[in-house]
Image (spheres, rainbow, N blue to C red):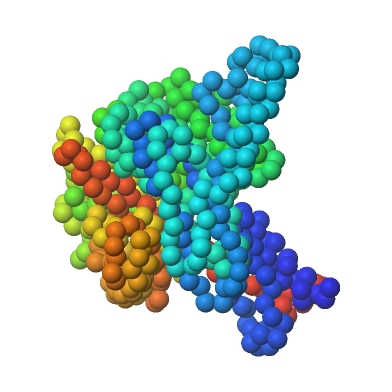
Amino acid sequence: MNRTTLSLIAGATALAAVTGFAAVSAPDPGSAEQRTGAAATLPVERTGLLCPQPSTSDLAETTYTSFTPVTEGADDKGTAVLRAAARQSSPGEDEDGGSEDEKDGENGSADEKDEKGDKDAAEDDKADKPVLQLQEPGKPVTAEADGADAPALVGTADGRFASGWTAQQTTEVAAGTGRGLQGVACSAADTQFWFPGASTDDSRTDYIHLTNPDDSAAVVDIELYGKDGELETTVGEGITVKPRSSEPVLLSTLTAEKQTDVTVHVVVRSGRVGAAVQALDDETGGDWLPASADPSGRLVLPGIPKDATAVRLVAFTPGDADVDLKVRLASPSGLITPAGNETLHVKGGMTAAFDLGDLTRGEAGSLVLTAPDGSVPVVAAVRVLRGEEGKQESAFIPAARPVETRATALDNTATGTTLSVTAPEGDAEVKVTASAGTKGGTPQTKTYSIKSGTTQDIEAPVPAGLKGGGYALTVETRAGGPVYASRTLASTESGVPFFTVQPLPDDRGMVAVPDASENLSVLQR
């Protein structure tokens, strides 16, 4: 094997280490990029996604959606498959995965062992069957599941389906704790996550869902931080997540302290996992809380609904340094400073929460948080309420990563979908493409200009000839920026405004392959 090939494989290996599943192939040695010495930008050729178990409610109705945008230069072959996690813990299992009955009688009868073996084999067989499989790029596919049996999913995509592969699960719960619309984008595995905005209060039932995509066990530590610092936990260290399985952990069982606002820090000792917090409230419904963007001195929380009746900001800074965050709202007319909340003080290692009221006041808006000189890193999220007291629903918006190249939102419908785009630092141009629908229709594309410092709820395109069903909205940054985006799904049930908000992080579907000549020079040292 020549040195050029070795250097390219090394670059791809480094990428895989950072992004979990991602991988690329080397460009043709005779390509223009190789001849001129310029770095080649290529579609990712293998990636993976993990979806947590949607609900434990018997009233839940879940829709899974999978989609890959058409990508120039992608392979002409490939697959994208989501399968049920092979094994999932149930409330009656101990931390080693065995039930209490099994623990008491490890030397059970042959019939009992045979029965258990048959059950395990049936579960493994179920896990091998695809829940959702794409047929072609550019057209989403869906699957539905009812009740508490809807599984966590583990999936991989390669070839023409890998670049920009996106999956989403949307669940409607008609009544009970957490009633409302709950949505979450399936995510890649990683080794560290921050979740400001969780709770161990009696009114909340918050689970951290950990999903392991690999064939070996992962070991995870969960740290909780409240208003006075780190909370004392009982079983938060060394949690084992079995191979290709999902483990929901109730946060209130990790500590005796009851606190309204908690920051959850997930650290993976060995292996890697996907992670998301499901936050369920007795009075105000519930939704998924995705991980915040990595700690930074500048954060953007995009797409707070214009009719939000209450906005609560939760922020946390790791380490010992305090910080006074400058708070601005990117509105349709530009950046403004909320009266009475010009700066917010966050103590080092302590979770801080601030009620910002009806912050948006009937206009589109995104929060922009800045530490002085960007010197102190922060994570943050907002909890948003819509509706009047007694008929309120909640959702969460964490600090988001920018749409550097492209991002996709799924499960959109002709009514009830709001796409919000903000460009806090400079003018930007974005292209938005509505895919074909799951039940027909042809793609449509529009281009929009976003002025610096503003947030716009744009009138997104709809597939021509749409005959029901959902479709994908793909946002591409064409010029300027950085650009941040989120999508809100909304409906009204019995007078309650059900809704869910998903920020749109870059899909990381393209990668710059290191220049061969530069890598050769490194090898020759």
Q: Could you tell me which residue is drawn at 18 percent across and 57 percent down? A: 363
The foreground one among 298 and 15 is: 15
On the question of residue 309 being in view, the answer is yes
Q: Residue at x 34, y 33 (%)?
A: 59
Identity of the residue drawn at 80% across and 72% down: 523
Q: Nearer the viewer, residue 349 or 233?
A: 233
Which is more toward the observer, 69 or 524? 69
Horizontal and vertical percent for residue 480? 38, 75
Q: Residue at x 42, y 53 (%)?
A: 142
Q: Quarter-wise, where is residue 172 in the image? A: top left
Instruction: Please state the horizontal and vertical placement of residue 171, each as a whole percent of the image.
Output: 36, 42
Q: Report whether 398 appears left or right of 446.
A: right
Quadrant (top left/top right/bottom left/bottom right) for the C terminus:
bottom right
- For the N terminus, the quadrant is bottom right
Q: Is residue 5 left or right of residue 445?
A: right
Q: Is residue 365 visible?
A: no
Residue 380 in percent (x, y) is at 40, 46
Q: How many marks?
A: 0
| Residue 253 pos. (x, y %) | 48, 23
Quadrant position of residue 354: top left
User: Relative to residue 264, is residue 301 depicted above or below?
Assistant: below
Q: Is residue 375 left or right of residue 86?
A: left
Answer above or below: position of 282 versus 5: above
| Vertical relation: 172 (above or below) 257 | below
